[in-house]
Amino acid sequence: MRTRLKQLVRAALAPFLRWLQAQLAVLDARLVDLQAGQDDLARLNRAVIEAHSSEIDVIGRELAQQRLLLESLELRQAELIAEVRAHTPDDVGDARLVD
């Protein structure tokens, strides 16, 4: 009797179990596709980050060069102001040469 009951349950559940296996296989395939897509997105993201990093490095170097140029120009300006003041009489408008 028990054996017969088990056989009936197996026979009744067999189509459902096959359907469930097919659904799990579809979900597994979709998961594999999603993982592959995530890998592609991760590679693209790394490429974009590397590109931005190199752009930032270039901009940083250019800013450093401009800072050095500005400092040298400020130094030269101070030298020229000192030179003009040295050759200008004291009573002629020092206020015009204010830094």
Image (spheres, rainbow, N blue to C red):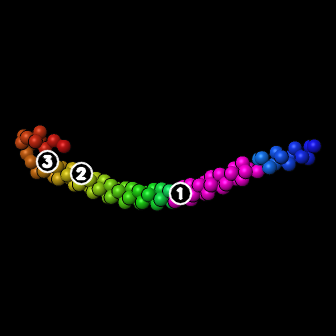
Q: Quadrant of the N terminus?
A: top right
- Horizontally, residue 69 falls left or right of residue 93, namely right
Query: x and y percent of residue 45 in the render?
Result: 48, 56
- Horizontally, residue 4 falls left or right of residue 72, namely right
Q: Residue furthest left?
A: 92
Q: Which label sits in the foreground, 1 or 2?
A: 1
Q: Which label sits in the foreground, 3 or 1?
A: 1
Residue designated by label 2: 74
**Residue at 76% across, 51% down:** 14
The magenta segment is: 14-40
Residue 89, quarter of picture: top left
Q: Nearer the viewer, residue 61 or 79?
A: 61
**Residue at 77% across, 46% down:** 12
Mark before the other along the chain sequence, 3 or 1: 1
Q: Secondary structure at mark 3?
A: helix
**Of the numbered discs in the image, which one, if any, rests on residue 37?**
1
Residue 62, quarter of picture: bottom left
**Of the numbered discs in the image, which one, if any, rests on residue 85?**
3
**Residue at 67% across, 54% down:** 22
Query: x and y percent of residue 87 in the render?
Result: 11, 51
- Horizontally, residue 55 falls left or right of residue 9, namely left
